[in-house]
């Protein structure tokens, strides 16, 4: 089945965000069937707070690909590129051989907070 990008609105900050086909694919591969109510940044913040983690650990960074501001659940060390969820999902779906670095980063985004 072909997946199409979906335009969604964050219930938290009211910002519109794209639930990309790549990200949908990514969700599906992890048996996450629900559609995200919040934008990636709010999702991460909420997940952290729910698990009693220090939200201070979240860092505001700029995607190395599309330059969109995004949040990551770690302090970037500066030697590896950081991507937003969209670009990450896109990279993931467009390559068969996933680099361990990207896989690791994607895992962090999905499991952040409750690992
Ligand atoms: Zn939001
Ligand atoms: Zn990006």
Image (tube, grey):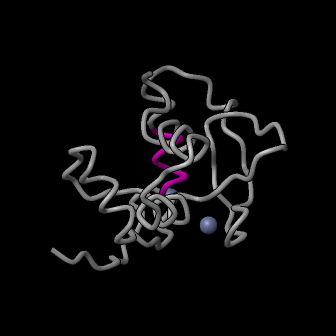
Instruction: Examine the rendered structure and indicate whether residue 74 appears above or below residue 9.
Output: above
What secondary structure characterizes most of the magenta part?
A: helix
Please provide percent x and percent y for residue 106. Answer: 50, 45
- Residue in front for this viewpoint, 51 or 1: 1
Q: Which residue is at a point 61% across and 42% down the rendered structure image?
A: 101
Please provide percent x and percent y for residue 51. Answer: 44, 23
Instruction: Examine the rendered structure and indicate whether residue 62 appears above or below residue 46.
Output: below
- Residue in front for this viewpoint, 67 or 12: 67
Q: How many marks?
A: 0
Magenta-span inclusion, residue 93: no
Image: magenta residue range: 39-46
Single out the residue that lies furthest toward the left. Answer: 1
Please provide percent x and percent y for residue 55. Answer: 62, 31
Q: Which residue is at a point 42% across and 28% down the rendered structure image?
A: 50
Left/right placement of residue 59 relative to residue 39 reads right
Instruction: Examine the rendered structure and indicate whether residue 41 appears above or below residue 109.
Output: below
Q: Which residue is at a point 51% across and 43% down the rendered structure image?
A: 103
Q: Which residue is at a point 34% across and 55% down the rendered structure image?
A: 26
- Residue in front for this viewpoint, 82 or 14: 82
- Residue in front for this viewpoint, 82 or 114: 82
Image quarter in which the N terminus is found:
bottom left
Magenta-span inclusion, residue 43: yes
Image quarter in which the C terminus is found:
top left
Single out the residue that lies furthest toward the front. Answer: 97
Please provide percent x and percent y for residue 112. Answer: 49, 32
């Amino acid at each position: 089945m072909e997946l199409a990008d979906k335009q969604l609105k964050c219930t938290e900050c009211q910002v519109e965000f794209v639930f990309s086909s790549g990200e949908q694919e990514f969700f599906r591969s992890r048996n996450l069937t629900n559609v995200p109510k919040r934008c990636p940044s709010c999702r991460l913040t909420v997940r952290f707070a729910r698990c009693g983690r220090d939200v201070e650990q979240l860092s505001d960074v700029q995607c190395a690909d599309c330059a969109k501001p995004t949040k990551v659940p770690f302090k970037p060390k500066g030697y590896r590129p950081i991507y937003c969820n969209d670009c990450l999902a896109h990279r993931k779906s467009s390559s068969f051989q996933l680099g361990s670095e990207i896989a690791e980063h994607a895992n962090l985004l999905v499991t952040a907070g409750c690992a």
